[in-house]
Image (cartoon, helix red, strand yellow):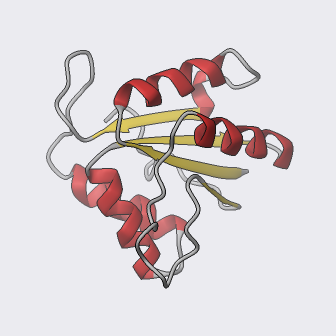
């Protein structure tokens, strides 16, 4: 399983990319969307969610600095996670997330890769996923 993550400043773009992915070979079980902001039509985080966001990115990254940069961005935007069964679908997810405006989390950090959406070959357990938050 390959996990692909994109973070969006605009929740409408996150909604749009999820709708696109659902119409193109992805199913609802392979997509997670989490927004930390209280917006009409979207669930606001529950107590402890901030810790879950950090736990999620700490699970994905071995590099603590990169995990914290993504957790901070995720707390200020909408996180879209795609759990892809193949490299081809993972690359399609990366392309879609980037085309729909995933932010460059590390744009101002010279010590990181500077990519927008990220692809990590790591399975994310159900209790770590940011589903339904």
For image coordinates 58% across by 52% down, the residue present is: 117
What x and y, as percent, mark residue 5? 55, 49
Classify 63 as above or below 101.
Answer: below
Which residue appears farthest toward the bottom when viewing the image?
111
Residue at left offset 35%, top offset 41%: 9
The answer to which quarter of the image holds residue 35 is top left
Is residue 98 shown left or right of residue 104?
right
Task: Tell me the quarter of the picture where residue 114 sits.
Answer: bottom right
Q: Is residue 132 left or right of residue 13?
A: left
Residue 123 vs residue 81, the one in the foreground: 81
Q: Position of residue 85 (x, y in %)?
A: 78, 42
Front in this rendered view, residue 27 or 128 = 27
- Which residue is rendered at x = 73% and y = 50% of the image? 1
Quarter holding the C terminus? Answer: top left
Picture coordinates of residue 86, whole percent (x, y):
83, 45
Based on the displayed image, in which of its 4 quarters is residue 24 positioned?
top right
Q: In the visual, does 28 lie left or right of 49? A: right
Q: Is 67 rendered above or below residue 3? A: below
Placement of 118 over or under 112, stated as above or below? above
How far across and how far down the image is residue 122, in percent? Answer: 66, 61
Q: Residue shown at 57%/54% (left/top)?
A: 124
Horizontal relation, residue 44 to residue 14: left or right? left
Q: How many marks?
A: 0
């Amino acid at each position: 399983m390959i996990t692909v993550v994109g973070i969006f400043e605009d929740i409408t773009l996150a909604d749009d990319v999820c709708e696109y992915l659902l119409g193109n070979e992805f199913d609802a079980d392979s997509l997670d969307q989490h927004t930390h902001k209280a917006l009409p039509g979207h669930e606001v985080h529950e107590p402890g969610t901030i810790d879950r966001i950090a736990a999620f990115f700490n699970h994905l990254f071995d590099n603590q600095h990169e995990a914290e940069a993504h957790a901070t961005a995720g707390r200020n935007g909408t996180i879209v996670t795609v759990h892809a069964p193949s490299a081809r679908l993972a690359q399609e997810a990366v392309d879609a997330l980037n085309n729909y405006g995933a932010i460059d989390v590390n744009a101002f950090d010279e010590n990181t890769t500077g990519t927008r959406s990220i692809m990590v070959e790591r399975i994310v357990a159900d209790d770590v996923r940011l589903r339904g938050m």
